[in-house]
């Protein structure tokens, strides 16, 4: 009897990666991780830059919109173009010299200069609005919101919007009596006007017979006076070690006293030139800096001849950027401004400019 032999195959031994293979795999993994990390860092930096540019653009556009809106309203007196017909318990301040002094009569004198819907100061170097001759001590050069740099300009007008026949609501949200201007807004200044007449008064005197006006289409509007400047922001910076952030401010009257309010964050400089119509045809003949216009000097054009304004606003990022250097010089009218950035880092900036026709000029 034959027997069959069965042969068994030897089992293959299990084998792992060799040291060389592990090293190659590790190197490839590290290269991939480095690439991914580089992409992440690059994307993060790109996001930070785009976010910074977006905020600059948002702040710049808003600031310019506010400035343009106010300039277009300058010298609007409720439809009455002849200020010689405006009387009242206060009446128009016809002083030739412009001043904004923080005294007992300062707010009233400053707001009632209806003959000057636009005014400005061309300030350079170490000049301040409060310097003797400038006489704008209502803009502080120390303490809260101090002036930093650039020009100062002012607009005056009667508020164009109305609720009923008055630009402030009546009755107001306070305990009775609250149905008249004198009850609700005793310290504010108002212009009651028709097409041919006007009465200028403080709220507390609103019911005085000297402020009565009998004519069709009467409206009572809050008198607005605002002076714009670049000051130090009240808001805490995200980069406190790099100093306070400059912002666009405006001084106005709140409850009859001067108050500085922040308009737009990050505005680094403000420059403005004024278009003068010297021929009386409503067309700009030449643009001047503020110090070249003087209503008291016969050799210079007067403020009443200004029919347009050209504005430059330089807006910067809140924080400087590592690895970025900004040594640009920005031409703003006749001024060339080279910012002094943080050493080794720079602020991104964007320059905005606009020319505005003053709608209510002569």
Image (cartoon, rainbow, N blue to C red):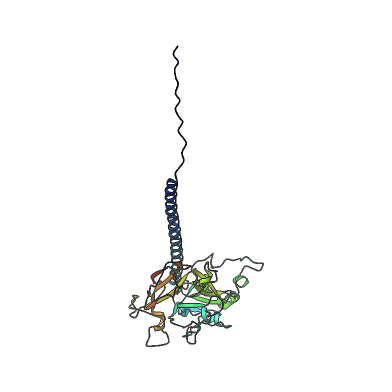
- Residue at far front of view: 1
| Numbered disc total | 0
- Residue at far top of view: 1
Where is residue 131? Give x, y as percent: 49, 85
Asked which quadrant contains residue 74, the reply is bottom left
> Between residues 258 and 204, which one lies in front from this camera angle?
258
Asked whether residue 151 appears in the rendered view, the answer is no
> Between residues 193 and 332, which one lies in front from this camera angle?
332
Quadrant of the rendering where the N terminus is positioned: top left
Asked which quadrant contains residue 56, the reply is bottom left
Looking at the image, residue 362 lies above or below residue 27: below
> Between residues 209 and 297, which one lies in front from this camera angle?
297
Looking at the image, residue 301 lies above or below residue 264: below
Looking at the image, residue 333 lies above or below residue 62: below
Where is residue 324? Give x, y as percent: 42, 67
> Between residues 98 and 34, which one lies in front from this camera angle?
34
Where is residue 298? Give x, y as percent: 38, 88
Asked whether residue 200 appears in the rendered view, the answer is yes
Looking at the image, residue 180 lies above or below residue 112: above
Where is residue 261? Give x, y as percent: 53, 72
Quadrant of the rendering where the C terminus is positioned: bottom left
């Amino acid at each position: 009897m034959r027997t069959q032999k069965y042969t068994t195959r030897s089992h293959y031994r299990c084998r792992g990666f060799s040291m060389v293979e592990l090293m190659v795999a590790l190197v490839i993994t590290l290269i991939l991780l480095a690439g991914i990390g580089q992409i992440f860092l690059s994307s993060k930096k790109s996001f930070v830059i785009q976010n910074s540019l977006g905020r600059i653009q948002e702040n710049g556009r808003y600031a310019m919109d506010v400035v343009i809106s106010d300039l277009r309203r300058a010298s609007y007196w409720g439809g009455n173009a002849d200020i010689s017909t405006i009387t009242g318990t206060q009446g128009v301040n016809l002083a030739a010299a412009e001043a904004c002094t923080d005294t007992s009569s300062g707010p009233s004198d400053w707001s009632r200069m209806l003959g000057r819907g636009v005014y400005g100061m061309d300030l350079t170097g170490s000049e301040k609005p409060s310097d003797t001759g400038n006489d704008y001590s209502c803009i502080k050069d120390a303490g809260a919101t101090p002036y930093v740099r650039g020009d100062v300009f002012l607009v005056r007008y009667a508020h164009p919007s109305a609720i009923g026949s008055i630009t402030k609501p009546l009755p107001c949200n306070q305990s009775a009596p609250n149905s008249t201007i004198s009850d609700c807004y005793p310290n504010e200044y108002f212009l009651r006007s028709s097409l041919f007449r006007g009465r200028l008064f403080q709220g507390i005197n609103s019911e005085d017979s000297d402020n009565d006006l009998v004519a069709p289409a009467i409206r009572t509007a809050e008198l607005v006076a605002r002076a714009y400047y670049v000051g130090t922001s009240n808001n805490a910076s995200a980069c406190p070690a790099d100093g306070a952030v400059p912002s666009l401010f405006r001084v106005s009257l709140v409850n009859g006293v001067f108050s500085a309010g922040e308009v737009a964050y990050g505005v680094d400089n403000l420059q403005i030139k004024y278009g003068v119509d010297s021929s009386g045809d409503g067309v700009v003949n030449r643009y001047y800096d503020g110090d070249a216009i003087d209503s008291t000097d016969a050799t210079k054009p007067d403020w009443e001849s200004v029919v347009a304004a050209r504005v430059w606003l330089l807006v910067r990022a809140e924080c400087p950027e590592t690895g970025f250097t900004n040594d640009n010089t920005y031409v703003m009218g006749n001024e060339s401004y080279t910012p002094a950035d943080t050493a080794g880092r720079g602020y991104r900036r964007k320059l905005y400019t606009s020319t505005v026709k003053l709608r209510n000029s002569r």
